[in-house]
Amino acid sequence: MATDSVIDFKVWMSQVQVQMEIALDRYLPASTHIPERLHDAMRYSVLDGGKRVRPLLAFAAGALVDADPARLEAAGAALEMIHAYSLVHDDMPAMDNDVLRRGKPTVHVAFGEATALLAGDALQTAAFDVLSATTLTDSPSDQLKMINILARASGSLGMCGGQGIDLYSVGQELTLPELEMMHILKTGALIRAAVLLGSYCGTPLSDEARNALDHYAKCVGLAFQVVDDILDCEADSATLGKTAGKDAANNKPTYVALLGMKGAKEKAEELKQAAFDALAPFGEKAKLLHALAGYIVDRKY
Ligand code: GRG
């Protein structure tokens, strides 16, 4: 990317991140609402942290269809609420038992387990509250479709299903197709939903264009996880000298374990290229989606 385009992309990213912070602050119940402790925990988990990758994808897809920014903010808020809920629950002792997230104590550490459980539950329903109470498209049937996209992506046929496969595979060897299936569901489904929701917030796309966009979203969703594994492995070997490619603390399979570091990096590059190729029919209008695929694969954290 030319230097000017890189600067434009970074400016766009920080604008959307700031815009989303303000929108999330507005969409989340105020801390003064009873019960204050629950609303504090919800706000603590969502606000002031996170790269906002899913809203960024929704906004970039929205640029293809000249979407109204207010609609994208609502879709982005719903996505970020689902994402935050998944992190709150994933961090709990029954799952990953993590004490730090985004550089601060996890929700169950700061507020207690019962509140963390409740905050995650309430964030999940708050996402559907936003999606169903805000006009997101001119077509009521498309709005229902959007609600369905997020529900499918989050439930047992999507993110929760992927998390289930992850939990039940601890200590077992997974083949590459099995690992891929787990991540397509666990991380990929919500990333795909982000792109699709953004694309519904403006002028309707043809089926052909929507299929191309869907292919882009699937490639980016998987690439996100391959890169996450690479970054985790690099951080682990830097700090603990763990066996390359094994999430030793949880004994979980990773792309690095199955493909080696070089193979995992090649896989991420292949997926990035496939994502770029899928955008070809959209020309200049897809430049933000193009830059985001690059950012997701080339990020360092
Ligand atoms: C508990 C229902 C339930 C689901 C959990 C997505 C997930 C399923 C758990 C998250 C575990 C994890 C850390 C997965 C790796 C990929 C991932 C989702 C990383 C965190 O997402 P980022 O990098 O986080 O977008 P920020 O903090 O930037 O929002």
Image (tube, rainbow, N blue to C red):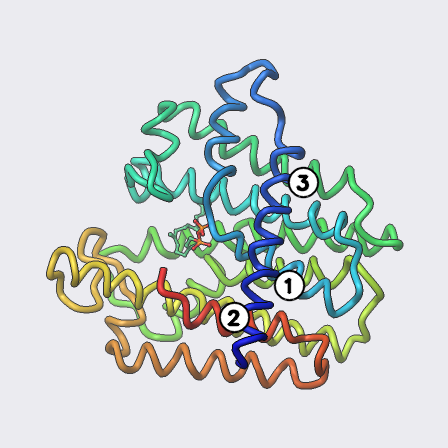
Dot 1: within a 10 Å radius of its alpha carbon, few (fewer than 14), some, or many (20 or more) residues?
A: many
- Earlier residue among tags 2 and 1: 1
Disc ID at residue 195: 1
Disc ID at residue 128: 3
CB under 8 Å between callouts 2 and 1? Answer: yes
Mark closer to the observer (3, 1): 1
Q: Residue at (50%, 22%) from the top-left corner? A: 38
CB under 8 Å between callouts 3 and 1? Answer: no
Residue 263 against residue 140 in the figure, above or below: below
- Earlier residue among tags 3 and 1: 3
- Relative to the observer, which residue lies in front, 231 or 156? 231
Dot 3: within a 10 Å radius of its alpha carbon, few (fewer than 14), some, or many (20 or more) residues?
A: some
Q: Residue at (44%, 30%) from the top-left corner? A: 117
User: From the viewer's perspective, is 51 left or right of 108?
Assistant: right
Q: Residue at (56%, 55%) from the top-left corner? A: 14
Estimate the spatial distance between the alpha carbons at disc 2 and disc 1, rounded to whole Å.
10 Å
Residue 95 against residue 139 in the figure, above or below: above
Tell me where residue 215 sits by quadrant.
Answer: bottom right
- Relative to the observer, which residue lies in front, 33 or 165? 33
- Relative to the observer, which residue lies in front, 51 or 263? 51
Percent coordinates x, y for residue 105 in the rendering: 32, 34
Residue 129 against residue 76 in the figure, above or below: above
Percent coordinates x, y for residue 18 in the rendering: 59, 47
Q: What amino acid type should be assigned to the residue bearing mark 3?
A: Phe
Q: What amino acid type should be assigned to the residue bearing mark 1?
A: Val
Percent coordinates x, y for residue 170 in the rendering: 26, 55
